[in-house]
Image (cartoon, grey):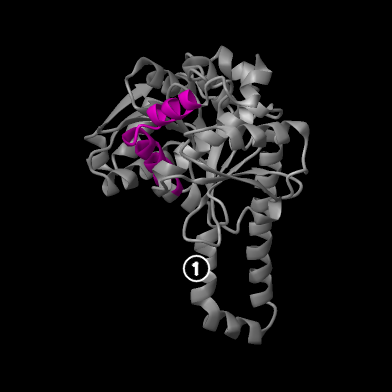
């Protein structure tokens, strides 16, 4: 299936020029990609002049308005029929494109996507999932990263199934390992919600995942597990802490290497190692969070992403379409049925 992807060209800190350049890089890597750019037509066509190969595989849909970075979700919903973000998501709903990518306001994108696409059968709430770097060769899938501040055990079970399906596509694992984020690894630790979710996952039969209990926040980056599941409040706090720590480490290294002539000489010797560290921590190399659980593929790019980061987000969207993420989630969710303790408690 050749993916056709809608790009909210007005989202992000820079706007059309970076979004178009990122799409051009993605198409250079994958010749079959097709695009629908949504936003100010004049700006988009001006940016496309620098990428004739991309222009030949693209259409432009003019949008009168843009969702501002500080817009409330309710405001974004009211004007969604005129904004670049709203029109991009609605193109997914109409079946005109396979997926949508936006670097705009996260809360607004979540609200617009949920209203337009609705949740899949068997899914109560969508979750925001992303790939985070680890010490191993593969990234860890973590969700929810902010879509749902409060979750019940049923939500956590569904997130586990969706996260595992995402991991299977991105990493090719047959049965991805899954752990719930908790304040300890002992079976007795955690809230009643976490305990109920763990019991439901232990008792579920036939799921394509390997539930391994609990993990703590200091283990997120070790790579000991393929999928980490939590509520959106805890997930967002953990994500921001990880991002802050990465900036702290890189800034501290810069300061240290500039502190003296000897340090500068040491930097020259260790430069290959520091460049590898920078690349591993560069958010552009892991760009592209996904709203899982909707009747359509929507990918959120960092607002500050450069063209490489945008290309990665586009490639994530295309891969989920090509490997039928919606069908995979639907098949796994159907296995949960009404037999688990969490499902029974929800009746």
At which x and y percent is residue 283?
Answer: 53, 52
Q: Camera-side residue: 249 or 138?
A: 138
Quarter of the image where one finds residue 94? top left
Q: Which residue is mark 1?
A: 276
Quarter of the image where one finds residue 191? top right
**Number of numbered discs:** 1
In the rendered structure, does residue 313 fall within the stretch colored magenta? yes
Q: Residues within 10 Å of mark 1 (few under 14, many from 20)?
A: few
In the rendered structure, does residue 183 fall within the stretch colored magenta? no
Q: Give the residue drawn at x 58%, y 27%.
A: 68
Describe residue 192's horizontal placement relative to residue 295 as left or right. Answer: right
At which x and y percent is residue 85?
Answer: 48, 25
Q: Give the residue drawn at x 33%, y 24%.
A: 97
* Quadrant the N terminus occupies: top left
At which x and y percent is residue 317?
Answer: 40, 36
Q: Camera-side residue: 224 or 308?
A: 224
* Vertical order, 263 against 88 (above or below): below
Q: Camera-side residue: 298 or 223?
A: 223
The magenta-colored residue range is 309-335
* Vertical order, 63 against 231 (above or below): above
């Amino acid at each position: 299936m050749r993916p056709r992807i809608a790009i909210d060209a007005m989202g992000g800190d820079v706007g059309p020029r970076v979004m178009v350049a990122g799409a051009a890089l993605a198409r250079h890597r994958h010749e079959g990609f097709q695009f629908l750019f949504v936003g100010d037509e004049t700006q988009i066509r001006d940016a496309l002049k620098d990428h004739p190969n991309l222009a030949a595989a693209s259409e432009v849909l003019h949008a009168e308005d843009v969702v501002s970075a500080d817009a409330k979700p309710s405001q974004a919903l009211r004007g969604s029929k005129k904004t670049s973000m709203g029109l991009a998501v609605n193109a997914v709903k109409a079946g005109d494109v396979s997926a949508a990518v936006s670097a705009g306001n996260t809360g607004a994108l979540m609200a617009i996507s949920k209203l337009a696409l609705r949740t899949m059968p068997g899914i109560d709430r969508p979750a925001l999932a992303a790939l985070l770097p680890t010490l191993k060769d593969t990234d860890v899938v973590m969700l929810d990263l902010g879509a749902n501040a409060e979750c019940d055990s049923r939500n956590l079970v569904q997130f586990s199934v969706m996260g595992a399906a995402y991991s299977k596509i991105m990493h090719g694992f047959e049965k991805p390992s899954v752990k719930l984020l908790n304040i300890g690894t002992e079976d007795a630790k955690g809230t009643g919600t976490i305990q109920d979710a763990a019991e439901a996952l232990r008792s579920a039969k036939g799921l394509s995942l390997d539930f391994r209990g609990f993990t703590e926040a200091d283990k997120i980056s070790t790579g000991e597990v393929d999928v980490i599941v939590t509520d959106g409040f805890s997930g967002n706090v953990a994500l921001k802490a990880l991002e802050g720590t990465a900036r702290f480490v890189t800034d501290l290294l810069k300061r240290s290497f500039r502190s003296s002539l000897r340090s500068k000489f040491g930097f020259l010797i260790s430069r290959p190692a520091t460049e590898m560290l920078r690349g591993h921590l560069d958010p552009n190399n892991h760009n592209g969070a996904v709203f899982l659980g909707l009747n359509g593929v929507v990918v959120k790019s960092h607002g500050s992403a450069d063209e490489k980061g945008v290309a990665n987000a586009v490639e994530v969207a295309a891969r989920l379409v090509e490997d039928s993420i919606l069908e995979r989630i639907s098949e796994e969710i159907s296995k949960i049925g009404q037999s688990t303790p969490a499902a029974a408690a929800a009746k």
